[in-house]
Image (cartoon, rainbow, N blue to C red):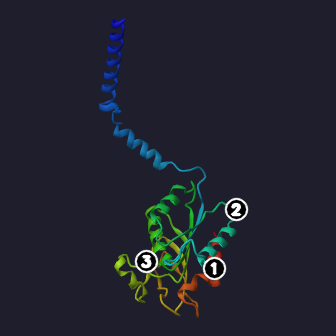
Amino acid sequence: MAEIRSAEIRSARRAAAEKKCKNGPRGRRRPISLDLVIAASKTCSLRRPPGGIAAWQVVISGFTQDLERPNGCQQLWDSLRRQRADGQTPVLLEPWNYDWRGLAELIWRFRPAGPPPRVDVFAYSWGGGWGFPRLAAELQKRGLEIARAVLCDAVYRPRLRLLAGAALLPVWQIVVPENVREVSWYYQRSGFPMGHPVVAADPRRTRVNPGVLVRGVTHHYMDDQACWWSGCLEAAAAA
């Protein structure tokens, strides 16, 4: 009986040694071929969901706004969402400092097989002076465009945080990237901060409509103005 037991133990040890030799130390599997990894990554990058999303609408809020307190951007978002009740067009409400690279990648990944998706942006304050140009630049890297942008008292934001206070100075311009087809903008001169002028990086490719001056309203109430809402809803309905 002891001899049989010893033979079983030796057999189990040989099997464990063979498995260790096959998988590597501590039972780890052997490395996967680099060629297989590259081939798999290429396959995943080219894969897209069936159907795709043909249109996106993005509302970008200002630097003093959040989701806890009601504001004009939230009301605009709700109106746009109701206007697109068919459920085919995502209507997003994002803060000015959102992950624009991630959103651009999402739009690209869910692009339809035919024509590229239409993207419309409606932005207020730093949403227009920071978020909108960043999203446009990220979409441009992926070969995508923004069809219409409607800006509300858009305020330029310097890249350096130490210069953020300089956004109050009326010396800046908001330069629209060349992959934006058309921009309309509203501004006020009743109090600081004031919306900065909007200009095209390439006027041959981007149409910047004349700015609309809203009188008797300060910056903090500009996103509540019916004129901006009407401009956004009109642009969204044309999509």
User: Which residue: 34% across, 7% down?
Assistant: 2
Q: What crowding class fits label 3: few (fewer than 14 Cα within 10 Å), some (14-19), or many (20 or more)? A: some
Foreground mark, 3 or 2? 2
Element marked by disc 1 = helix
Question: Residue 29: horizontal and vertical position, in percent?
Answer: 35, 33
Amino acid carrying mark 2 in the image: Asp
- Say which mark, if any, is on residue 229: 1
Quadrant including the N terminus:
top left
Position of residue 174 relative to residue 19, above or below, is below
Position of residue 29 relative to residue 157, above or below, is above
Q: What crowding class fits label 1: few (fewer than 14 Cα within 10 Å), some (14-19), or many (20 or more)? A: many
Question: Residue 215: horizontal and vertical position, in percent?
Answer: 58, 93
Q: What crowding class fits label 2: few (fewer than 14 Cα within 10 Å), some (14-19), or many (20 or more)? A: few
Query: How far apart are the alpha carbons under marks 1 and 2?
Result: 20 Å
For marks 1 and 2, the one nearer the N-term is: 2
User: Which residue: 39% across, 84% down?
Assistant: 165
| Residue at the spot of label 3 | 201
| Residue at the spot of label 2 | 86
The number of numbered discs placed on residues in the rendered structure image is 3
